[in-house]
Image (cartoon, grey):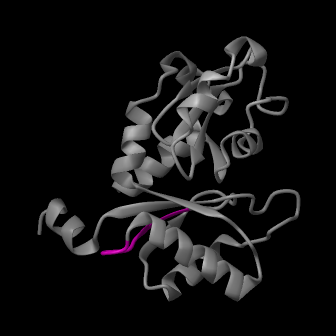
Amino acid sequence: MCASEADGKRGPRQIALLRGVNVGGHNRVPMAHLRELMGELGYGDVRTHLQSGNAVFTAPGTPPEQAAREIEGQLASALGLGVRVLVRTAEELAQVVSANPLPAAVAEPSRLLVTFLSAPPSPELLRDLDPADFEPDLFGVGEREIYVWCPEGVRTIKLSYAFFERRFGVVATARNWNTVTRLLELARA
């Protein structure tokens, strides 16, 4: 059986990005438990990356938005956690990587963040953002992502996921470039 046939039987890969887990002792979710909970939902080939709530899985016939709701529900019922989840397909994540509007920042992958949004940002609200207000940080806009390069590090950025949540009224979660590209590798494996 060739690789494409195996992919067809396995189903398209999806990537779950859990917001705010295992940070500062809050919303504790052991990754082994997350894999188990996702398996109980019927998802297959679940793999996690790091301890910050990243999972790659298959869910044939389940759209990403439905998978996000199901994972949120499973976390609430099994662990009592109100954790928001964003899901992208492997194809969508590949597009995020290829559409990076800040290609020079890839040289410092731990300082390049991709903030994933639950919906496209409002064009009107985007126009109101003056890049000079956030210097030395730079940002670029994707379809449902904001790319942020933080030359002085991520600890003091103004363009945090919380900023974008307030600004655009969406759910947001950020991952550095190393994590984004590793998740894409896992999804393609």
Residue 31 vertical position relative to residue 36 in the rendered view, above or below: above
How far across and down, in percent of the image, does residue 99 sit?
40, 30
Could you say which is closer to the camera, residue 161 or residue 52? 161
Name the residue furthest right: 25
Quadrant of the frame with the C terminus: bottom left
For the point 74% across and 37% down, which residue is it? Answer: 160
Residue 109 vertical position relative to residue 68 in the rendered view, above or below: above
Quadrant of the frame with the N terminus: bottom left
Find residue 88 and report its image quarter. bottom left
Could you say which is closer to the camera, residue 170 or residue 102? 170
* Relative side of 164 to 94, left or right: right
For the point 18% across and 61% down, which residue is it? Answer: 3
- Range shown magenta: 55-62
For the point 42% across and 46% down, which residue is it? Answer: 93
Is residue 109 visible from the viewing direction of this image? no
Is residue 48 visible from the viewing direction of this image? yes
* Relative side of 169 to 186, left or right: right
Name the residue furthest front: 124
For the point 38% across and 68% down, which residue is it? Answer: 63
Residue 166 vertical position relative to residue 13 in the rendered view, above or below: above
Q: Is residue 179 magenta?
A: no
How far across and down, in percent of the image, does residue 46 sit?
47, 72
How far across and down, in percent of the image, does residue 28 sit?
79, 70
Residue 166 vertical position relative to residue 23 in the rendered view, above or below: above
Question: Count of labels shown?
Answer: 0
